[in-house]
Image (cartoon, rainbow, N blue to C red):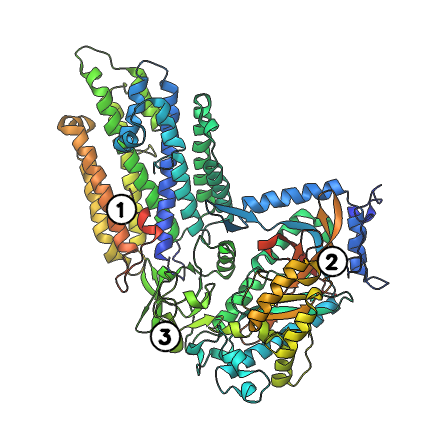
Amino acid sequence: MIIVSPTPLLSRYAECMMWLARYMERMENLARLLEVTETFVRNAEGQTAWDSILAINSDESLFQRIHNTTQHTEIVPFYVTETRNPSSLVSLAQEVRENARAVRPLVSIELWTQLNVFSRNLLNLKNGDMADHNLAELCTRVRQDCQTHFGIAEGTLYRDQAWLFYRLGKALERSDQITRLIDIRYHMLLPQSEAPGSDIDLTQWTSVLRSAAAYHAFRRLRPVTLTPANIVGFLLKNDGFPRSLSTNLRQIDETLTLLSSHDNLRQLCSPLLECVAELRASLQDQTAEEIIIRGLHDYMSWIQTQLRDLQNAIAVTFWPVITLHEAAPTKMAEQEQS
Amino acid sequence: MTNALDLAPPPTRGLLDNYATPDFFCELMNRKAPAPPLIDCVKKRLSALQIQELQNRTASAEAQLYRMGITFTVYTDREAIDRILPFDAIPRMITAEEWQHIERGVQQRIQAINLFLHDIYHEQHILKDGVVPAELVLQNANYCQAMVGLHVPGGVYVHINGTDLIRDQQGRFLVLEDNARTPSGVSYVIENRHMMLRLMPDLASGLPIRSVEEYGSRLHNALCEVAPEGVDDPQVVLLSPGIYNSAYFEHVFLSREMGVPLVEGRDLFVDEHKVFMRTVMGPKPVHSIYRRLNDEFLDPIAFNPDSLLGVPGLVEAYRRGNVTLANALGTGVADDKAVYAYMPRIIRYYLDEDPILDSVETHICAEPEGLAYTLANLDKLVVKPVGESGGYGLLIGPQATQAELNDFSQKLRHNPANYISQPTIGLSVTPTLCGDTVEARHVDLRPFAVTGRSVWVMPGGLSRVALRKGSLVVNSSQGGGSKDTWVMAS
């Protein structure tokens, strides 16, 4: 049941709720990815694994500008404490903090208190905290703090429109993250698995699943063998797995449908719903094998473009740019990044 | 009343054993004998506590305040630091009888202030009758031309007011200043109470402490009462400068307690002289704005064109009666430090009553006799610039060096109209935890009043303590802390 409060949701609140969820989700994903990479970096393929983190986040050129190297010793701080990198844990914590402060009048005190402590701790990170030997520990802590946040949100956020925008942000971010992960990791591992007669590198493919918290869920499909196509299929199309693309597209669909039932929002929401329907149809109409044969990379890129367009369409619909008076350049403008 | 603290034998070293209160009125200790029984009870319970225990409880309170972000932000060149208002766990107590006096006095004062503001923006009788010098009002930087001749709902200009009170050596309550613009601090009153009940349940148990919980709903009601006429279900909002403002926590707190949106200037717009907020359902009309922005930032068209915080066209919408601002514009004339000196006369003029609360004797340096007296007695007086707030730029004569005195008298001769002077008052003190002991620290009191159709004074107030030994400055920006204020119901 979603309540329409007597006072409709302020556009800025909607925007900040959405970005709060997106940044928290992004942080959890990054922490998990760093954690998994750290665990597998000890083997021969280590360097490649670290490179792929840059690729997943499309950060190669930024990293080059700052460091002139691809040594993983530099990649770790780049993703933990580097304030010039907008996708580092510290930068994300800053974004989370600002959005949380903006929606503080709206959310429960419990939700705010946890974010207040969590984001401040991250912002206070000293370089020593990310020395090699405790990166995994730090990442585990961040991941668990993110999960605590999602738990508090589930347990205390009032189910009105603010909740819908929060859910929308979370599902959009998960959809984006899972397609990036598949795209980059698949193509990184492809050459070796294509070699005739070669066994695929099980460890590497398992780490793809682990990076999406999907390993144990995948294992429960007992008869399914560990092949690249099966893994891609699971991450894209499994309706029971909470981080799969299909699950999150369904969430977006359901959330927008709930929103469209409010008063005058039906018309505003219908182009958004069409966009989601197209995405879902394209996914349902193809098997994983077909997607791979037709070109996994092109398909993942197309989905990411569609998701970006959807995010922009949501922004234009619910927090339109001011037309009455000239809009002042504000902090919000910077926030409209991917 | 059975209570662990009541039954506990006094510890070997009692909390208040070494407490000395030289010359000042102590809120807890040197009451006339016999002490009021409830105060006596708290005193006994406190004595049964160990200093270690009090230290532990205080540390845990401050950690909790920090976690919950009950903080104000201090900006340095490099970073923004969140600070808590230091919290002292020994409450400041006010008896039912004392409170009755304060309540009546504050109500009277706010009535007079509202009548004064209405008068100076309309017929100006008080100026024509020569009770208050016309130039003091009309040349005042806070006098707002946009308010001239404007009708405000219910004749209320000051909806939210904080009155700063102090007590002298005899325990007499005196008004130190009025805060009729955008007074802050009320959130700490309520949060301090929550913290106190959590921290010292044994100290509070069974006592008839008056509740401060009503503030949010009282405020919301008042803001609805003063909404433009003809609006059935007014939309109230709180207008804040935003998340970087040092009082942002209080804005969050009040909007949450009232259940209204906290908006920033960019969330509002004016169309055909009506105010709207941007929502996901489209524009929604707004009728009453509790604004925590100063006058000059409210509307770049009417005031400071460089300000990005306000709402273009807001003042014109207000002038047309389509929206209510609380507080009204131009209320700063009433809490001006020079106008303060005339407040007893203002109360008599409009209400034909003697002031219930006394003021501090004040010399106006703009007047020749006031300046002469101030210069002759500089080493005994507190001299304040009239335009400043937050305890900045003042001279405390008895604590100043000869060089500082000479310096200041130069400034004073140069621009006498900028200053008033008052005798130094031996502010009352209250037992306060200071490191390893409990010592006397000076304290003031800011009760908050909300005015819609009538004036309601919240039974409590912000008790600010000067934590530095001997200091008389209680402002949070200058090392002040706060205490919970317990007003007794009987």
Q: Nearer the viewer, mark 1 or mark 3?
A: 3
Q: Residues within 10 Å of mark 3 (few under 14, many from 20)?
A: some
In the displayed structure image, the side of residue A83 where residue B452 appears, left or right: right
Q: Which residue is mark 1?
A: A311
The image quarter containing residue B356 is bottom right
Q: Secondary structure at mark 2?
A: strand
**Marks 3 and 2, how far apart at CA:** 48 Å
**Marks 2 and 1, how far apart at CA:** 59 Å
Q: Is residue A271 placed above or below B184 in the rendered structure?
A: above
In the displayed structure image, the side of residue B279 where residue B328 appears, left or right: right
Q: Do badges 3 and 2 share one subunit?
A: yes
Q: Nearer the viewer, mark 3 or mark 2?
A: 2
Q: Which mark is residue B429?
A: 2
Q: Is residue A70 placed above or below A94 in the rendered structure?
A: above
Of the two numbered discs 3 and 2 on the same chain, state the one appearing first in sequence.
Answer: 3
Q: Quadrant of the C terminus of chain A?
A: top left
Q: Secondary structure at mark 1?
A: helix
Percent from the top left, x then y, of residue A128? 48, 27
In the displayed structure image, the side of residue A177 where residue A109 appears, left or right: right
In the displayed structure image, the side of residue B120 where residue A84 appears, left or right: left
Q: Which residue is mark 3?
A: B316
**Marks 1 and 3, how far apart at CA:** 37 Å
Residue type at tag 3: Glu
